[in-house]
Image (cartoon, rainbow, N blue to C red):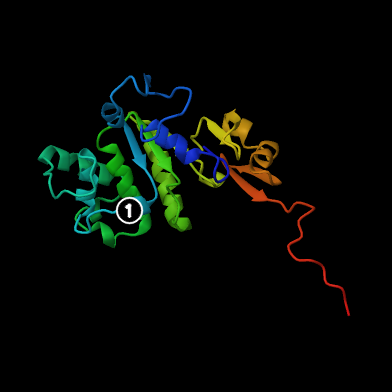
């Protein structure tokens, strides 16, 4: 999902998880209408990975324990004790995410990229049918971002991979395996939807962002650059004395 700030991308994700409700119309998630199906049950089928700033984890947690919090929908294990089976699943996920050597390391000591991969594991422990990513690469440097995106590609290739929705401001973060792109405009309007090749064009992105944008595709990934509009003048011209 792509669009300018304020277009409603995060709001749409919060509706999918049942934390916000539409003032009109209906929302259908995984074949169920919100309001006609228990929200708690629905949330067990939806995993969410957001920016680290919204996860104030207990600072004593290890990576292994942080993944296990996903079984209980909490950010601490102060009142819950994972079973041996749950711990085993958490460690299998950490191994798949190439974090096995760090499973006993405290979460606060991990790098930002490693923490984000822990959050993927946390979202996957309940085996969700749908996985939501809200700007998951925000704050990551280039190597960490590419590692994170490679992890998503690897996840996509597994037989039991859930469907996922990702919000991003950067076209190069859209994995090549992406099949559908939703482009929102500044007022929350749907400017286009379809395959990446159909949606990620100069014309459509320029219209959605109200700014001249050029797009290039290379190796299945897309790259955008903003062009300077001809009328833009940041500083008034100064007359020579």
Where does the image place residue 91, in percent across and percent down from the top left?
Answer: 21, 45
Q: Quadrant of residue 150?
A: top left
Residue 222: percent from the left, percent from the top?
Answer: 59, 43
Quarter of the image with the C terminus is bottom right
Q: Is residue 187 placed above or below 118 in the rendered structure?
A: above
Q: Residue at x 24, y 55 (%)?
A: 102
For residue 71, side relative to residue 182 (left or right): left
- Asked where in the image residue 126 lies, by quadrant, the reply is top left
Residue 125: x %, y % from top left: 25, 38
Answer above or below: position of 30 versus 140. Answer: above
Which residue is nearer to you in this view: 235 or 31? 235
Q: Please tell me which residue is depicted at 30% across the width and 59% down the height of the picture.
A: 110
User: In the figure, is residue 190 to the left or right of 63?
Assistant: right
In percent of width and height, residue 63 lies at: 24, 52
Q: What residue would you read off at disc 1?
A: 115
Residue at the far right: name it. 241
Q: Secondary structure at mark 1?
A: helix
What residue do we see at 57% from left, 41% from top?
3
- 154 lies above or below 118: above
**Mark 1 crowd level (few <14, some 14–19, many ≥20, 10 Å Cα):** some
Residue 69: name its quadrant: top left
Q: Nearer the viewer, residue 231 or 165?
A: 231
Residue 25 left/right relative to 128? right
Furthest-front residue in this view: 23
């Amino acid at each position: 999902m792509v669009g300018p700030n304020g277009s409603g991308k995060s709001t749409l994700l919060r509706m999918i998880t049942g934390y916000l409700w539409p003032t009109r119309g209906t929302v259908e998630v995984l074949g169920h209408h919100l309001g006609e199906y228990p929200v708690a049950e629905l949330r067990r089928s939806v995993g969410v990975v957001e920016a680290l700033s919204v996860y104030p984890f207990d600072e004593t947690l290890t990576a292994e324990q942080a993944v296990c919090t996903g079984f209980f929908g909490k950010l601490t294990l102060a009142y819950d004790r994972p079973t041996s089976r749950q711990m085993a699943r958490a460690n299998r996920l950490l191994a798949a995410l190439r974090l096995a050597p760090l499973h006993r390391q405290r979460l606060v000591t991990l790098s930002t990229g490693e923490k984000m991969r822990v959050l993927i594991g946390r979202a996957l422990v309940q085996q969700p049918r749908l996985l939501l990513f809200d700007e998951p690469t925000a704050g990551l440097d280039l190597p960490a971002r590419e590692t994170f995106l490679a992890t998503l590609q690897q996840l996509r290739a597994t037989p039991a991979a859930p469907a996922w929705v990702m919000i991003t401001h950067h076209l190069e973060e859209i994995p090549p395996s992406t099949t559908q792109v939703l482009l929102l405009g500044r007022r929350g309007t749907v400017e286009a939807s379809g395959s990446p090749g159909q949606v990620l064009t100069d014309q459509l992105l320029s219209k959605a962002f109200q700014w001249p944008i050029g797009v290039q595709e290379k190796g299945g990934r897309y790259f955008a650059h903003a062009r300077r509009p001809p009328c833009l003048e940041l500083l008034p011209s100064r007359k020579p004395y």
